[in-house]
Amino acid sequence: MKNGYFGYYGGRFVPETLIEPLNDLLINYKKLKKLPRFQSELKKLLADFAGRPTPLFKSESLSVRAGCDVYLKREDLAHTGSHKINNAVGQALVARFSGKKKIIAETGAGQHGVAAAAAAVITGLKCRVFMGEVDICRQQENVRRMKLLGAEVIPVKEGTRTLREAVSAAIRSWVSSPRDSYYLLGSCVGPHPYPLMVRDFQSVIGREVKKQLSSAPTHLVACVGGGSNSIGLFYPFFNDKNVKFTGVEAGGAASLKNGRVGVLHGSRSYLLYGSGGQIKDTHSVAPGLDYCGVGPEHSYYKDTRRADYFTVSDSGALKAFRWLSKNEGIIPALESSHALWWVMNNKFKKGDRIVVCLSGRGDKDLDVVKKV
Ligand SMILES: Cc1ncc(COP(=O)(O)O)c(C=O)c1O
């Protein structure tokens, strides 16, 4: 990354009122990265609050199916049930060390909302979460959890009433009070320095995998919504050129596979366009993947062919959801199920070692699965 750009992607395409808060955030974040007090508090919260390190589990049933060793990085076992807690705890600490009193967040699947709400409690901040009405309906359990954790959940009624509009509403709210509130973005999207910060906080996933595997993996596989669990797994292996990166998008929300370059939510990246240059409405059974854009670092990985990106349909994800539950005793999030289905349907060599990021647990998805 140079000056907020990953090659051609990233940057800061925001209203004037946000330039100064973003500059302040970058300066604060650079200082905090080097501050031993910040680092030791982060380390302690990740261990004792978030439950890290998460296990790396060899899935015998997936290994038989793929014909090589398949490991699951168990982010489903992290506190609040997904990888989102890594970033939420990190950014909540940035907010508190910067003297902010209130967090603003957006959420799709509700996992980031729950993680942000829990992180706000433990760091002594107030929390307000924007969530599309459609997502409120399909992830009710997470809405109840956020409220129990003391967060205010604001329904977003515009447009597709999913993550895209929730992000827009959160940014609008932040624009109106950038001095006392902190925008805790949930994925590696948005204006600089968010993609960088979120990657830093999520890289704990890949760093742990490096320590946990006795010999290097050949493939790293993860689902891609905004792209944070995947970048967190991939980035620590960036210079290990023998390790292949595979990102799996939802078929109905595949910005990398089917998109064109444009600007949305403060940065330049691949986006899905409909007719007349408008942003296209997306669809995925997994609310965390139901987003029309993607983090700029993934766009850079795509163009430079550092990573390959594929799509999986709703029905594939649902099959993987049931398959892993029945064969391994683990109920995966519908988001992670996309990555699982890709592994279950590809050919590998006998000596390959695949690590799949099991980004979250599927308890939140039981109602969705019942209805389809
Ligand atoms: C469990 C889970 N996995 C994956 C994602 C996708 O997000 P990202 O691509 O930022 O990891 C989400 C988003 O809400 C999620 O809840």
Image (cartoon, grey):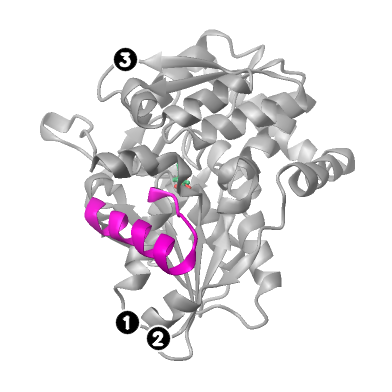
- Residue type, label 3: Lys
Indicate the position of residue 255 as horizontal and vertical percent values. 29, 47
Q: Which residue is mark 1?
A: 347
Instruction: Find out whether residue 121 is within the magenta segment.
Output: no
Sequence-wise, which precedes: disc 2 or disc 3?
A: 2
Q: Residue at x 56, y 31 (%)?
A: 114
Other-residue count near label 3 (Cα within 10 Å), few / some / many at <14 / 14–19 / ≥20:
some
Q: Which residue is mark 3?
A: 157
| 83 sits to left or right of 291 | right
In the image, residue 326 lies in the stretch drawn in magenta: yes
Q: Looking at the picture, which amino acid does disc 1 mark?
A: Lys
Q: Nearer the viewer, mark 2 or mark 1?
A: 2
| Mark 1–mark 3 distance (CA, rounded to whole Å) | 44 Å
Closer to the camera in the image, 115 or 103: 115
The reply to whether residue 185 is visible in this rendering is no
Q: Is residue 309 visible?
A: yes
Query: Quarter of the image containing the C terminus?
Result: top left
Observer-nearest of 46 and 245: 46
- Pick the residue in front: 292 or 328: 328
Q: Residue at x 40, y 49 (%)?
A: 335
**Element carrying mark 2:** loop
**CB atoms of marks 1 and 3 within 8 Å:** no
Relative to 78, is 152 above or below?
Answer: above
Give left or right: position of 142 versus 47: left
Q: Which SS class for mark 1?
A: loop
- The amino acid sitting under disc 2 is Gly
Q: Which residues are magenta?
A: 313-334
